[in-house]
Image (spheres, rainbow, N blue to C red):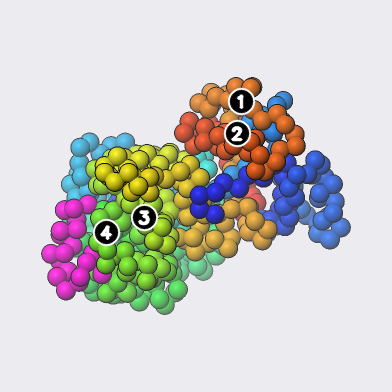
Amino acid sequence: ELGQLRIRLKCAVGICSTSGVILFIEEGCDDPVIAALNYDRYLKDIDIHVIFNSVSDPAGKDSFYFPGFVDTHIHASQYPNCGIFGNSTLLDWLDTYTFPLESSLNDENIAALTYDAVISQTLKHGTTCASYFTTIDSNSSKIMADLCKSKGQRAFIGKVCMNQHSPSYYQETIEECKDASLDLIEYILKDLNSPLIKPIITPRFAITCSSALMDSLSEVAEEFDLPIQTHLNENDSEIAFVKELFKDCHSYTDVYHKHGLLNGKTVLAHCIHLEDSEIELLKKSSAGISHCPISNSSLTSGECRVKELLNYGLKVSLGSDVSGGFTVSILENARQALLVSRHRAMSVEDPERKEECKLSVAEVLYLATMGGAKVLNLSDKIGSFDVGKEFDAQLIDLSTKGSNVSIFPWQKVTNDKIQPNGKDRIKLENIVAKWLFNGDDRNVKSVWVRGKLCHQNL
Ligand code: GUN
Ligand code: FE
């Protein structure tokens, strides 16, 4: 739940080793084997994980299980450019850095190396589910889908669609785009046929998509009942250009609305400069937002009003937006989301409104998990540990060699009989806060998707 960390102590979690579904959760249990035995009579093949046990044990390691991170906006193809953006802003960044790199992935060897690296890195940082943009090329996008399947990550794969206002070397016609999109969709749904990998319709953004292209993509999305992802209201010059191109539309958001691209399965990256009418339109359509704080600071795009959007009842999640964002780490994006919200607070005069801007540790970790699950319409499957959900998890170990998180012995919770609402709970929450602010991939010990181990930091 937003704003609340649910910490379960001495908890045994039973996971079906074939389906990866969580079968039982036993809190306050001293012996996971006994917990398992109660269920074992009825169910075979249960894997048992004991979660959040050792923080309460002064002799044990500082480790706990956390739901896998969800990255709702990442350009897999841009991974080689992480950290390279100079002083550019969106439109010149696209021309200078991004389009040349993306077109170079037409070479399938380069694409395979790039995609292999980005999946390994996201898994290593605890991302169990990601919504990826690839490039306009469908063949290399198939390679991306293959790699996600073989590495076991849960993923949406979107071939980038664009037919105008980009260099001639990186553009396609409507027909080429439709053929390539259908080719990839069929490949993922029929040939790959994995419960974890889904196609997603991906018009790049309004500037690079003509009305006719957007209409045609909307039809494809409807025909195959697919989600949609794109960019919205990221940068002032971008917005001005969109308004010039689509004079009949009331706003940038209305462009997507009028072209049938705005619904409960749409994921919109950025959403920084929203007019009131646009916020209303987003609410009415149930579209989800991917907040990309590192990208927005790096490209000086602006500060998204996350807390207000949440309070208004919109679905908000986190995106790394590699390589507008310089890291695949959702933990670091959660941390930066918290800082951006405080920068917003500093720019607001009214003391009450100041407080209303601030995101808490619990809130940004919600955005990183359940927020993402809701935006991707997967909250019945992932985002938290609940019976019936699939086990997408990361084992966090704060005591690993080289860890940046320091917890002194006297800071540990030593009382075995910890009351959920007692003062020791605060200590546990502070351990989670230490992880948010100082943790990194060195603390990600193991990663599971649907109960299957996908990464181990030995
Ligand atoms: N708008 C259109 N394309 C892109 C992209 O690749 N990254 C970001 N951040 N914004 C975009
Ligand atoms: Fe992006």
Percent x, y of residue 29: 78, 44
Structural crowding at the residue carrying mark 2, measured as other residues with C-alpha within 10 Å and reported as few (<14), some (14–19) or many (≥20): some
Residue ID for mark 1: 411
Closer to the N terminus: mark 2 or mark 4? 4
Q: Is 249 a magenta residue?
A: yes
Asked if the residue under mark 1 is in contact with the one under mark 2, i.e. CB atoms within 8 Å, the reply is yes
The amino acid type found where label 3 is placed reads Glu
Closer to the N terminus: mark 3 or mark 2? 3
Closer to the N terminus: mark 1 or mark 3? 3
Percent x, y of residue 369: 51, 51
Residue 448 appears left or right of 285: right
The amino acid type found where label 4 is placed reads Leu
The amino acid type found where label 2 is placed reads Lys
Q: Residue at x 28, y 37 (%)?
A: 84
Q: What element carries label 4?
A: loop
Percent x, y of residue 185: 43, 67
Closer to the N terminus: mark 4 or mark 1? 4
Looking at the rendering, the stretch of residues picked out in magenta corresponds to 235-254
Residue ID for mark 2: 427
Q: What element carries label 2?
A: helix
Q: Disc 1 to disc 3, how far (Cα)? A: 35 Å
Residue 308 circle label: 3
The amino acid type found where label 1 is placed reads Gln
**CB at disc 2 and ligand 2 closer than 8 Å:** no
